[in-house]
Amino acid sequence: MNQNLQFDFGKGNGLCHNWIVVNDGVMGGLSEGEISYGENHLIFEGQLSLENNGGFASIRSPWSEYDLSEYKRVKMRIRGVGGEFGLTLENSRLFYQPNWRFLFTPSEDWQVLEIPLHEFEMTRLGRALGQKLNINEVENIIRIGIIKSDKKTEAFRLEIDYLVFE
């Protein structure tokens, strides 16, 4: 392994300013989520709506090829309010195919989470399928994201300084 895969979201790092918002409006929902940038971090904020069968807001990296087989964990420096979020790993462009998710609840103070990759769970359309990620499934990750889908309709805010795969 030559180096860590890192997303550093500070304003000075234009390479990480190409993440996109994908909200439940793609399926008729009314949830709101948006991205902005602070001096040293990304800000993901909005509010979920359960109207029109909605219930998720997300941010996602561009489609790419991420071979995570050399890594054991991901570290995130975060803070936030508004409940539970999920860090997601996708290996299919088809929304109905399973992906991998790790649920976390940030604190209002900056914290560093260290998440072993084997702790990610397989999900399909937001429902856990009872299977953990294994090493054979991390070679072909094509997108990384954050999702807010806990069905709580209060406002949320998540600030992310960095994501580093080690």
Image (cartoon, rainbow, N blue to C red):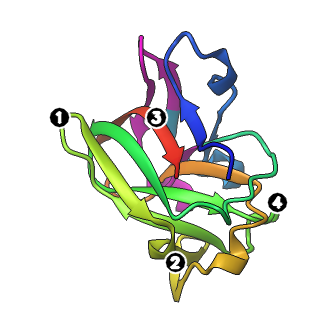
When the figure is inspected, residue 104 is found, relative to residue 45, above or below; the finding is: below
Mark 3 Cα shell of 10 Å, populated few (<14), some (14-19), many (≥20): some
**Which residue corresponds to mark 3?**
162
Q: Is residue 66 visible?
A: yes
Q: Nearer the viewer, residue 162 or 53?
A: 162
Image position of 108 (left or right of 131): left
**Which residue corresponds to mark 1?**
109
Foreground tag (2 vs 4) = 4
Q: Which amino acid does label 2 sit on?
A: Arg
Magenta region includes residue 31 = no
Q: Which is nearer the N-term, disc 3 or disc 4? A: 4
- x, y percentage for residue 96? 73, 71
Q: Distance between the residues labelled 3 and 4?
A: 24 Å
Q: Which is nearer the N-term, disc 4 or disc 1? A: 4
Foreground tag (1 vs 2) = 1
Residue in the image at 59% along x and 16% along y: 13
Q: Which of 100 and 153 is in front in this view?
A: 100
- Which region shows up in magenta? 34-59
**Which residue corresponds to mark 2?**
127
Residue in the image at 17% along x and 34% along y: 109
Q: Which is nearer the N-term, disc 2 or disc 4? A: 4
Residue in the image at 55% along x and 10% along y: 12
Q: What residue type is labelled 4?
A: Arg
Q: Distance between the residues labelled 1 and 2?
A: 29 Å
**Which residue corresponds to mark 4?**
93
